[in-house]
Each structure stands twice: as structure tokens, then as C-alpha cells.
Amino acid sequence: MTENVRVRFAPSPTGHLHIGGARTALFNWLYARHCGGTFVLRIEDTDTTRSTEEYIEAIIEGMKWLDLSWEEGPFRQTDRFDVYRGYVRNLVQQGKAYYCYCSAEELEARRQEAMAQGRPVMYDGRCRDLAEPVPGRTPSVRFRMPREGRTVVHDLIHGVVEFDNAQLDDLIILRSDNTPTYNFTVVVDDVDMKITHVIRGDDHLNNTPKQIQLYKALGYEIPKFAHLPMILGADKTRLSKRHGATSVMAYYEMGYLADALINYLVRLGWSFGDQEVFTREELIGHFSFENVGKAASVFNPEKLLWLNGQYIMKSDPAKLAELVVPFLLREGIVGEGQQVDMSWLAKAVVTLQERAKTLVELASSLRYFFHDPAAYDDKAKAKFLNEKSLPVLTELRDGLTALDDYTHDSIEKVFTSVVEKNGIKLGAIAQPVRVALTGGTVSPGIFEVMEIIGKETALRRIEKALLAIG
RNA sequence: GUCCCUAUCGUCUAGCCCGGCCUAGGACAUCGCCCUUUCAAGGCGGUAACACGGGUUCGAAUCCCGUUGGGGACGCCA
């Protein structure tokens, strides 16, 4: 075990917990658990115009659903504004930061111009050595970046990455409205919270040299960095709404299991030989940055769906029965406040486990365990509920009615005897019964279904089908 | 435009660091067959990749250089 590993997930509450964020949270969590370290949750809400309380709740909801637990936090940067201002003051006093009187509009105009002329888009440093304040202006504070030399990032995933200091901007650390900015607060907090490993998306790799300079100016030890590859959509652009669901909770709504999503996400960028399916314990045990890839990966919904199916198949039926209840309610299959016999439901679930890929699918397939078919599928009725099936169906009904011991095996015997007596194939009677019981041609093994719905229900449905044939 | 990252089947990836065991392995998807009361699940098999060009070497997917492609960053966003 590594000494006192402390990591953090630091989302900004400007949106829901999305797939990329969840993956970052996951890798932090895994590393903390792997090392027996501490996982800190920190809300980076310094952009007060875009951050909302609702999104903070939403992020926490997502973390909880995924079962990524943290030891410390959630901390909020808005609670620590005084702390940051203190650090800023010190830097200004030491001459490591300075007041900048350029307005946001002027800066923007210069940026446009530089862009158009193909010049480097950087702050020109015009307030760097100002002797006097500019009257009538409220200044922001900029960090005085070294102009010479190189800054080296030692990344656990990318190795050594070097940057010319000349290309590092004198970044604003305190806005003119007296609020601190991201690149500054992230450093102050990582120091104050004794973060040992900064694990985040590699879209932050370019910020890292600036932050390293900040650590140096503040006189603090530099943590280890691990920049994870991005997750892209099918068109290889950054994952966004255009690619469908990006909010983690949308996957809950679609009937995905948290463990399946976790398993999928971890394999996006991390691997362990040829293994595809992992328990959380295995993940924690095997996790290491050495097995994290460097290239961005494309989010593949089909594979997630397959994995979800695998998880549903292997889940404990009782657990699955619990999980599917909200979906039964949503589909109107079960009424609000209705008592459901959970051990009976678990039996029904067992028959569908290898058939359903999501909880939504599972719930809707469960419908005929609760209700007689409201209508028959047209094609199914035409093909299986007709004059041809009438006599065998009648015969089967009579055989079933006479059954005292109504079980899977005894039901099967009734079918077998009808089949033998009439010289037909099993399908010639099983399919009509399937339509009678479920309304369609697709279901688990028909003997299992019959046993679970019970003799009375099965006979009632067959009777209805007989009537429907006329 | 500048800087940074990156490059194995359509997709996720193993192999690369420590060149020969690679006729490049696994998984998803896809196609075919088997099993079969339907649908699944499962089994068997097929199609499918080392971006390109130069080196280095007896030998390169593996090392080096370049090109090209892709991604990211360049905010008083995070």
C-alpha cells in the first residue's frame, strides 16, 4: 500500500454528472481504494454565474447511484473565498502577482485580433510592470509567470511532458469582482487538502504547467499527476448531448445497473489482459495507472448494453426483483401502493434474466406475469390461435384442469401426451399456449411461465383464447 | 494560427517499455452453422487491424526521425 494517498474528484456544478465526469470520479475512487487512501469530493463552484444548487444535488445523486463513496466533503469553494484571497494578497505582496487594469472587452478584442493575424493568443503583459494604478478601473490580479525556461510535467500516464514557459500565460487568479479563478483555487485546495495525486481528464494537461508554477510560487510540494484520456462520441468528437445520453442518471432511467456502467467505463482506457467483466473487488485489486491507455476512446453503447445483460444474468434474482419495482410502477404494471410478493417476483425474474438487457426490458417482459393479455398480437393470433390449434388447445385445457399436482414437470407431461396423441410437434401446441398466456410469441419456457402464474390464471387465459378463436 | 497529447480489426483493447514466441490474441457489433417449444442464453466457425514514409537491425506492431490523421488547450469557464 502506498503512503497516505489522497485523491479528489472536483466537478463544477454547471451540469449533471456526465459520462466523462463519472469516469474521472471512478478512476479516483479506484485508486483511493486500491491504495487504502482517502477520496475527497470537492465542488468547484467558483463560477457563481453558472453553478447551481440543483446540479450539486444531481452530481451527488449520480455518485451515490454509482456507489462511489467519499471520505471527505463535499467541500465547496464558495465557502473558501477568503482563503483564496489571502493567498492572492500574499502573492501580490511578494511581487509574484500583479494588478491588471485591462477590461474583459479589451482583452477579448485583442484576442480576436491576434487570432486573425495568426499571432499567439496570449496576454501581452502590458500591466506586468505598471507603476501606478489606472484610475477608474477595478483591476483583476494576474500571476507573474516566468518567461524563460521550461516546465516539466511528470505524468503517471503520459510520462514526461515539457512546456516552454514563454508560452504560459500570465493567468488571472482573481477576477475584478474579487472572486478567484479555477487555476488558482485548484492549486490552493489541492495543497490545503493535501492531495497527493491529481487524477483528471487530459483536457487539463495544458493547465498543468501553469499550476506547477503556482505551486512553486506558493512554495508547496507538487503532487503527482495522472491525465486520463478523453471519452469521445461515435464521430470522434468530444462526448456531448448530440451523442445521446450523457448524464449518468439517464442510464439509470434506461434501466442500466450501476455496476455494469462502472465496468464499462473502467474498460474505456483501462485493461487487464483479456478480462472484460470484473467485480468491484477485482477492479480495486487490479487497478493501476500502468494499464491505463493514452489515446482517447469512443463510447460504444452496444457494448454497454451487452455488459448490462451480463450483469442482469449474473445478478441475484431477489436483488433484481427489488431493482425492477420502480420500473414496474413506471410502466403501470404495478399500481402505487400495491403489495408485491417479492419471492414470487424473484421467480418470475429468474425466467427473464438471460433475456432482458435492461431493467426497462425486464419490467415490460414481466407484464404478463401480472396481467392477462389485453390483446393478442395480430400476427401471432392469426398464426397460432385458429381452427387448427383449437382441438389441441382444448385437449390441453382438459388435461391441465385434471392436474392435481401443478408443477413445471407435470405440466410438461400433459403437453407431451397431447403431442404424442396427435402426432404433432411440441411447437404446434407450445406456441398457441404462449400466445394465449402472454399475448405474443416471445417468452421464457412456457412450462416455467405456467407454473409461476399458477393453474387458475393459466386456465383462465387459455379459456379466453379458446373463446377468441370462436 | 500557436502549443500539448495521441495513432493495432467498425468499436473497446492485448502485445510495445525488455525487438524474433505475432501466421497479431480477446471482447462488442456483424455474418454463417449447431442447440431449440418461441425469444434469448450457450457452443462452433467466418469477415475484419499494426496510418504512411524513411531509417536502425540478421530481424520491427514493437526502437528512432518525419508526414498524415484524430483529439485537446489557447477565457475575468472549469
Image (cartoon, coloured by chain):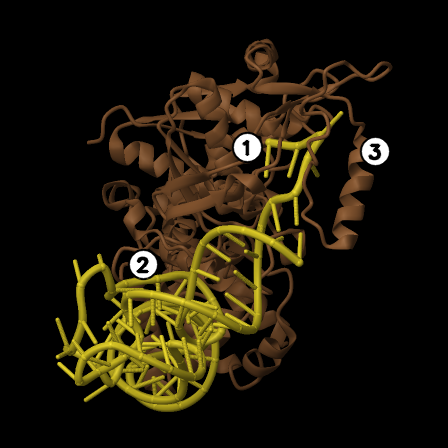
Chain colours: A brown, B yellow
Of residue B43 and residue A48, the one placed in the foreground of this image is A48
Residue A105 disc label: 3
Q: Amino acid at mark 3?
A: Glu
Residue sticking out furthest to the right: A136
- Left or right of A384, for residue A171: right
Q: Position of residue A145 (x, y in %)?
A: 56, 30
Mark 1 lies on residue = A11
What amino acid is labelled 1 in the image?
Pro
- For label 3, the SS is helix
The residue positioned 60% from the left and 59% from the top of the image is A237
Locate the N terminus of chain A by quadrant.
top left
Look at the numbered disc 2 and give the secondary structure of its residue. Answer: loop
Q: Secondary structure at mark 1?
A: loop
Question: Residue at the spot x=81%, y=27% of the render?
Answer: A103
Alpha-carbon neighbours of circle 3 within 10 Å: few (<14), some, or many (≥20)? few
- Is the same chain shared between marks 2 and 1? yes
Q: Residues within 10 Å of mark 2 (few under 14, many from 20)?
A: few
- Disc 3 is attached to a residue of which chain? A
| Chain on which label 1 sits | A
Tag 3 and tag 1 share a subunit? yes
Q: Amino acid at mark 2?
A: Glu
- Mark 2 or mark 1: which is in front? 1
Distance in Å between CA atoms under marks 3 and 2: 52 Å
Q: Residues within 10 Å of mark 1 (few under 14, many from 20)?
A: many
Disc 2 target residue: A276
